[in-house]
Amino acid sequence: MRALGLLLGLLLCGPFIFAQQPNALAQMVATRQAAGEKFPAHSLLIPCGGLDPSLQRFVADGLLFSLDEAAVSGLYQAAPTSISLEWPVSADQSITLQLVQSPALTDDFQVRISSRSGEAFPVQPGRYYRGIVAGEPRSVAAVSIFEGELMAVVARPGVGNLVLGRLPDDLQGRYILYRERDLLETPDFECDALELPPGVKKLPSIEGSSEQKVVDNCVRAYLECEYDFFLEKGSVQGVINHMTGLFNIVSALYQNESIDVDISEIFVWDTPDAFATSSTSSALNSFQNIRTSYNGDIAHLVSRGAPTGGGVAWVDVLCTNFGYAYSYIGSNYNPLPTYSWSANVLTHEMGHNLGSRHTHDCSWTVNGQPNQAIDGCGPQVGIDGNGSCGQGPIPAAGTIMSYCHLISSVGIDLSLGFGPQPGDLIRSKVNSAGCLSPCGGGGCNFDVAINRTHVDCFGNATGAATASPVGGTAPFSYAWSTGASTPGINGLAAGNYAVTLTDSEGCTATKNAAINQPSPLLLQTSAVDASCAGESDGIARALGNGGTPPYSYQWSNGSTLADNAGVPAGNYQVTIVDAAGCTASGSTTVQAAPGISLQFGVTDESVAGAADGAIQLGVSGGTPPYTFEWSNDASSKNINNLQAGTYVVTVTDSNGCSATGSATVEATTVACLPLVELPYEESFETGLGDWL
């Protein structure tokens, strides 16, 4: 595992190589630690070894993991404000992420969908964490946790961008950790930066900004996800998970520049959209025409369909009517998740909206000379920058507004952010924008964590939800959509429940709790009949479906197996119990063909030795046809020419069932007349035929 070996080597010497000024994320972590906040350790990944051969066609190196779903669910429910995550990077080494839960959504965030005429749609947001790699104060880490899913990107100076995500087509549900530089082919991305029309007033730049300057204003981003995005993810919740997980990375990159960028609204097209697909500029134009107003400071159309391969945005648009951008994001590169790539596209196009041009444009000051290019990555691949300055240098790694991703040996290191000049420019534009305000609404910035108990059995009302504030100022009041005003509600059927918390300063935070229920527990029964009457070789079968596997079975004859085998004909009742204690009952009947019955008709022998006896056999029951085996070796149903005696027959039907019986042929006895003694007299013949 060459590449991760390099990663590990850089890990071990990283603190010495990158002993630089801590970035904004490192300062956030240090502030929490100095205040005594704990960072409890969690391990969410179970190593599965190296890459399969099928994956080695796309990435040179990486590690596979399975997700500890119980640990992920527990962390999601607990929603601690600060955590440490252990990431294995080899068989015996790991890195530690120090993370703080950070808002990626504004207080009034909402989701709307096209099929409901744009009305608000309840969803379950994730838990969004940001921070650094322990010991690397210039690194950037963003981790998003959902119910049963994890998305993460870690950018490390000198190492590059690490991506952790689920393999989309993997039947085992495994995750991959790989370095973006190790992709054997990188996705294409080109960007058009559109200048505002003449007469549109631009914001001034504030001189003397630096990356340490705190920006008070917040940029509220309105995102629109087209129909192909919905089709790919399969549900509105799937789109929201992917989009907010990506945007957590975007927000982390801006937070590292001391700029707050949060999502104010996501509009999902769950019905076919009407956006143009011939080019990125046509898509942007149709987006502007369709979405003439929006809930945010800038609007971004995010596409998984056509047009592919890039993005386009108006430049320097704050407080104008041109706050639009379009980005095509690659959800996956063949079988690999490409979160770092997608986040870079979104961050780049938004950077144009916030005032920055490409770093290869002739619009920067280099060595005291104005109108110069910071780098030469664009011209190096045949893409000229605006202006007539000479080509800039090729850096070891590019920044967010560069085209260095098109040079395989350079790439973009997200830990470098925008770089000093583009970062200063964006900060000055955001600070001077009078149309902006803090995302938290005048200092309000707290969240709600919800601990849920789902319904145990389909149709029951056994769910519960408890809301807890994350941040804010106590005491808090609670307002549930059910009318309850307590932190917790119970006796809930499946459905969506919203709660709004208000703190003592009047700040509010709203969250939706989706209470789920399992599918109905269904029981199917069947039987395999006994082979013959009286035999115990039948099977009574039960098959569970739905509910919460695994299942246990209890049969009326005491069996606890799904296949209640070795039973005679009869009716059998069964109860199935799933893992949640839900039950379903049913019965099945094992049958057997009626037993074979023999009837005999006997014709006795007329006289002893005559051999003219006969037996006529009648057969009922069983399953014809029958075979016959007589003790005199006859094989016909009826037998004739019999002498007196007992004859045994075995009758076998087509199922192999048999019955044995016998009949006796007797000899007829001839009756004899009694002997009569006559008196003796002498006589003679007369000669005429008479006796005298």
Image: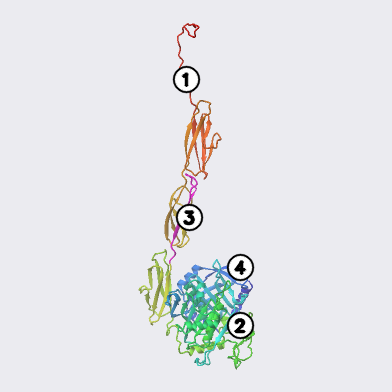
Read off the residue under disc 1. Answer: 672
Mark 4 / mark 2, whichever is N-terminal: 4
Q: What residue is disc 2 on?
A: 404
Q: Secondary structure at mark 1?
A: loop
Can residue 288 be seen from the camera position used here?
yes
- Residue kind at label 4, given as amino acid type: Asp
Question: What label does residue 52 carry, if any?
Answer: 4
Residue drawn at 55 percent across, 66 percent down: 172
Image location of residue 368, percent across then percent down: 60, 93
Secondary structure at badge 2 equals: helix
Return the mark for residue 562: 3
Q: Nearer the viewer, residue 631 or 103?
A: 631
Amino acid type, residue under disc 1 in the picture: Cys
The Cα atoms of the two marked residues, 3 and 4, are separated by 37 Å
The amino acid type of the residue labelled 3 equals: Ala
Magenta region: 517-540
Dot 3 falls on a residue whose secondary structure is loop
Q: Is residue 166 magenta?
A: no
| Spatial separation of the CA atoms under disc 3 and disc 1 | 75 Å
Crowding at label 4, few (<14), some or many (≥20) Cα neighbours within 10 Å? few
In the rendered structure, which amino acid carries the disc numbered 2? Cys
Give residue 543's position: percent from left, percent from top.
47, 57
Q: Earlier in the sequence, mark 2 or mark 3?
A: 2
Mark 2 Cα shell of 10 Å, populated few (<14), some (14-19), many (≥20): many
- Mark 1 or 2, nearer chain start: 2
Q: SS at mark 4? A: loop
| Location of residue 331 with respect to 298 vertically, above or below | above
